[in-house]
Amino acid sequence: MTPLVATPVREIDDDRERRDLERSWRSKPGLVGWLSANTHQKIGMRYIVTAFIFLLAGGIEALLMRIQLAKADNTFLGPDRYNQMFTTHGTTMMFLFAVPMMEGMAVYLVPLMIGTRNVAFPRLNAFGYWMYVFGAILLYWGVFTNTAPDMGWFAYPPLSGPQFSPGKRVDFWAQMITFTEISALCVATEIIATIVKQRAPGMSLNRIPIYVWSMLIQSFMILFAMPAVMVASTVMLLNDRTIGTHFVNPWAGGDPLLYQHVFWFFGHPEVYLIFIPALGFVSAIVETHSRRAMFGYPALVLAQLGNAFVAFGLWVHHMFATDLPQIGESYFTASSMMIAIASGTQIFCWIATLWSGRVKMRTPIYFVLGFIFIFVLGGLTGIMLASVPLDLQVHDTFFVVAHFHYVLIGGALFPLFGAFYHWYPKMTGRVMDEFVGKINFWLLFIGFNLTFFPMHILGLHGMTRRIYTYPSEMGWEPMNALATVGAFIILLGGIVFILNAVNSRKNGEEAGPDPWDGGTLEWATASPPKDYNFLNLPAATSRYPLWTDPKERVVVTGLDDTRREVLVTTLMDAEPHHRLVLPGPSIWPFLTALFSAIGLYGSVFKFSAYYVAMLGAFVGLVGWFWPRRREAES
Amino acid sequence: MRTASNRAAHDSKRLPVCLRHLRIAATTAYFVRGSVCAFARSQSVLDPAGPQSMHVFRLWSWFLAILTAIFVIVLALTAWALTRRHRGIEQEPLERVHIPSRETERKLLWTVGSGIAATVLILFGLLIASVTTGKAISELGNKQNGMVVEVIGNQWWWYVRYVNDDASQIVVTANEIHIPVGRPVRIRGTSNDVIHSFWVPELNGKRDLIPSRITDEWIQADRPGRYRGQCAEFCGMQHAHMSLWVIADPPDEFEKWKARQLQPAVDPSDLHLQAGRDVFLKYACVYCHSITGTTANGQVAPDLTHFASRTTLAAGTLPNTKGNLAGWIVDPQTIKPGNHMATLNLKPEELQPLVDYLESLQ
Amino acid sequence: MIAQRTLDVSELPVGSVSSHAPLWWGQLMLALIEASMFFILLAMYFYIRLSMDVWPPPGIQLPPVRPATIVLIPLVLSAAGSYIASEAAKKNDRGGMLLGLGLNIVLAVLFLVARGFAWGEWNFNWRATAYGSIMWGILYLHTIDAVADVILTVCLFAAIALGYTSVKQRLGVHVDSILWYFIVLIWLPAYVVLYWGARFVGAR
């Protein structure tokens, strides 16, 4: 390959290229076209919007809970409804909002950041999205028919087993997980393949944007963590409930703790699946708005890798109260504390970058600062929880509720909102209003702290989790009332965000390709990007291709623009290897998801419906892979 | 055309974010302190009444102090990073506008490196403190004069049995545990149905009660008092109403209590109370409850032999008074919806004798 | 027209039947996902063992070893068929692909049929305590994966036989081998655990 520095300057017929690309990347019209689309910006956007809707749904469930808890002995929600609320809130937030949102942002951003036109498996991408939607429908069908799960988002047996939770509530929950898990696995697979194989020429491993590293690491985590929840929810729990297995039946040789081990083997990495992409957001925002190259790039990448590995070695800290041998528990205390080293390293690198850069105090940076405040506080309560004696006091109290909301909202949601403000110009072509953005930030920040900080105190004062009411003589009412007020302030912040987002689409300042003077490749193309992303695929001559002299920038020519062709490069140094034709629009991913969903819905009632699902998937896949006429030539 | 991209080169104002952060932190701390002192402290981790919970409280205090200091330092560093005058990079040559000088990077490397090293050391210190506290707590249990109380979780009440090799010394009760002050008590726990968790914060951390497993913890009260506990593992519909009381008596009071508990049920002293007992034996009560000295021998609900000696009913849900008891018997599903007690269709003239009889069972 | 420094890639081939193809990586990921599931299930076998005093529980006869061991032979040989097909795909050798796929399918079906008979000799089902559940769970998952891969291989065979031998189909043949190697390789520890596990960690 010609070294990038030695590429010649040539004339490019950009008008002809534009015409060809627009034709080959066009979507089909109408409903069928909408169902057949598989460009990554469209699918990514669908994930983002759908996940945001579930953020709102989960938020409403939380508000209902907060109203009930605002007063002692309140009768706003009875126990059954309340138990459904907290279960659905947790399930929605974890499975239908947090992971799909992170996946959606990645699906949208990663191909742009690495300089390609689409993900490696566009139809798999679409299929994953439809599976997510069908799973969400299954759960919310239950919510609206009073069959919502009511045993907590982690559904411990024997409470969730056939004897103590008769009916279909738990079954709906367990099978919904199959859908969302398959969806996450699809995205993880294609993100890995895309990052490994479709990077811009010259984007060697040490030039990959930190957010892309985050997604690569997170995707590998998904491959190893998601199967565990499949085993826990479907193989163990659902089968115990429907076909008489005894995996977790203590009266037939099974063990409820086995479920906990397998579930938390997934459950702990799960929160890092949500958190690690957010760390990538923070890096992208900090380096762009500090206008300097990130300090400590290797340390940040290795710290995230460390986070990923160590995350798989922490799960027993969710089970300290089950009286496991002390020496085992001590190991998990050690690992749970040591993971803070990885997070701490990253925080120090970001502070160093802020310190030595020229920070523009725009809304994304506000959210990063909010992240630092809230996440660090949550991380420190996490260190407390890592200690077995402390945990045995505050486990399963509102102290833990406070902790995980601090780390999840601080560690993931605040960076996410920062990411929305940061990339909204790229996605829509307009900039969100700065002043309203800052109001948005303060409402969320104040509302959040007002809601969740009192919960630390409530937990220390003995208020356990998952109680639909409490007596007034416990003295918990004032803190609860305060938390409820805070929850409504969060709601206000959410409304302000939506108004800002909707209003800025029409009235926001026009963004142009690069409103922030960013360094990475997504800023090298129009806002919003065309379906084909770049007129000519860029090459990466450094870690921050856009911070190099425009005269030095290199683009790729020679791909056939009359079809959906991308460039495949090598793993380590991203040298061009071959050209790849990606599939165009196809209805088959949607149909495959639909046929599989019908079978999987049925399996909630009868095991044999699994075979219907497999048959349906087979039919769909045959259509999916049916060879074209012109492929009959060798 | 004026776009955000064109404007990107111009500066914007730097706001005093650090000050706003500090103000919020100070207000919060003030409110917290005020509220902490303000309300009732039963069932509080911060009010230890025994050696185990005292160990935890001390560990908590150290963790709180050290980790709060770290929090403040991190915030201060962040605030400082934003407010410092950017001498360094402003004076860098223009070609390197996005990458600071070697000296800056070197200084940052040392600072960040020291920060990481300090983090590692502090974490190790906390780890050691935690593990030694855990060991100290478990060693408190290896005492000669301990007694064993078996606690079995049920939906939604606590079965309590004082273990003894001598069968005539075994006390069976429910939802209320008396212990002698100053003596270690081993809570040996399991469950008859789903996973529950035994937690009396003023005495010790929690232990899950898991079916077909036995878990163990030691509690000890070093001063007399009433210590409230609550089930701390979601166990179904009425998890919110599964509380218990541990009552620490001076040793002689405890012996008196125990002696009374070992007696069979108080015989009804007049016709009215006898009528009450007859009502009890006639209705479905006997399928679930037991009263030693009568034919009632149900095993799936709290033992009522000394029901009136307990201070609460329905597992800490209501004070044990005649009014509450009457309400509970007539309509348990409104007080504790979903609980397993049947709604009896008592005749109106049967309620008063039944309530009086049960309240006579001291 | 615009002037830019350009890297011309028009000389590069379209598609690549090799481990450079994204699809190869995709199949590898799929194998990793399934392998994770198996390792969790195999760990569960030992965990459940620790919960019981008698292993296997009373009334359960150990699954006979000999049929399961014999069945290993067609399984391992079928991988050779995959290898032949995979190499032929790289060289665009239609005959070689058909031979390899055909060999794989025949041996795989033989393996599955024989497994059906071996499985039928178990005197317990999934309802017979947690032991039955985990044994059936592991065997069922592996069987379903194997059946799915055989069906996939048959479809590929049909495509090649009908003359569809473009890069796409050849790449499919090439990466199908990854799945089949996985099916064979993951069965080795699973076989040891299912059929020999109780002999190592059992207690009567």
Image (spheres, rainbow, N blue to C red):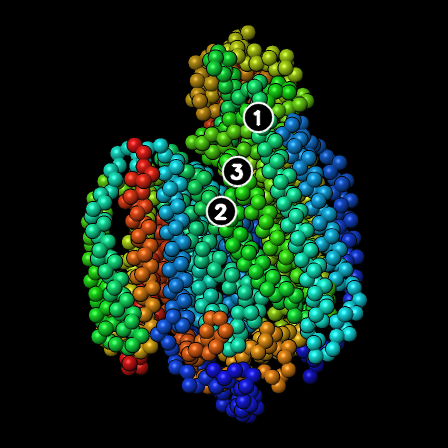
Q: Are marks 1 and 3 in contact (CB under 8 Å)?
A: no
Which chain hosts label 2?
A
Whole-percent x, y for residue B171 in the image = 52, 16
Q: Which residue carries the number 2 mark?
A: A264
Q: Are marks 2 and 1 in contact (CB under 8 Å)?
A: no
Question: Could you give the CA–CA distance between mark 3 and mark 2, rounded to whole angstroms?
Answer: 19 Å
| B82 or A423, nearer to the observer | B82
Question: Could you give the CA–CA distance between mark 2 and mark 1, rounded to whole angstroms?
Answer: 30 Å
Q: Is residue B327 above or below residue A284?
A: above
Instruction: Write the residue at 33% across / 72% down.
Output: C171
Q: Rate crowding at label 2 as few (under 14), some (14 to 19) or many (20 or more) other CA atoms within 10 Å.
A: many
Question: Could you give the CA–CA distance between mark 1 and mark 3, rounded to whole angstroms?
Answer: 17 Å
Q: Amino acid at mark 1?
A: Gly
Q: Are marks 3 and 2 in contact (CB under 8 Å)?
A: no
- Say whether residue A190 is left or right of residue C149: right
Q: Amino acid at mark 3?
A: Ile
Instruction: Write the residue at 61% across / 53% down.
Output: A341
Q: Which residue carries the number 3 mark?
A: A327
Q: Which residue carries the number 1 mark?
A: B141
Q: Amino acid at mark 2?
A: Trp
Which chain hosts label 3?
A
| C63 or B163, nearer to the observer | C63
Q: Rate crowding at label 3 as few (under 14), some (14 to 19) or many (20 or more) other CA atoms within 10 Å.
A: few
Q: Is residue A495 visible?
A: no
Camera-near label (3 vs 2) is 3
Q: Secondary structure at mark 1?
A: loop
Instruction: Write the residue at 53% across / 77% down.
Output: A202
Q: Secondary structure at mark 3?
A: helix
Q: Is residue A128 above or below residue B203?
A: below
Whole-percent x, y for residue A289 in the image = 68, 69
Which chain hosts label 1?
B
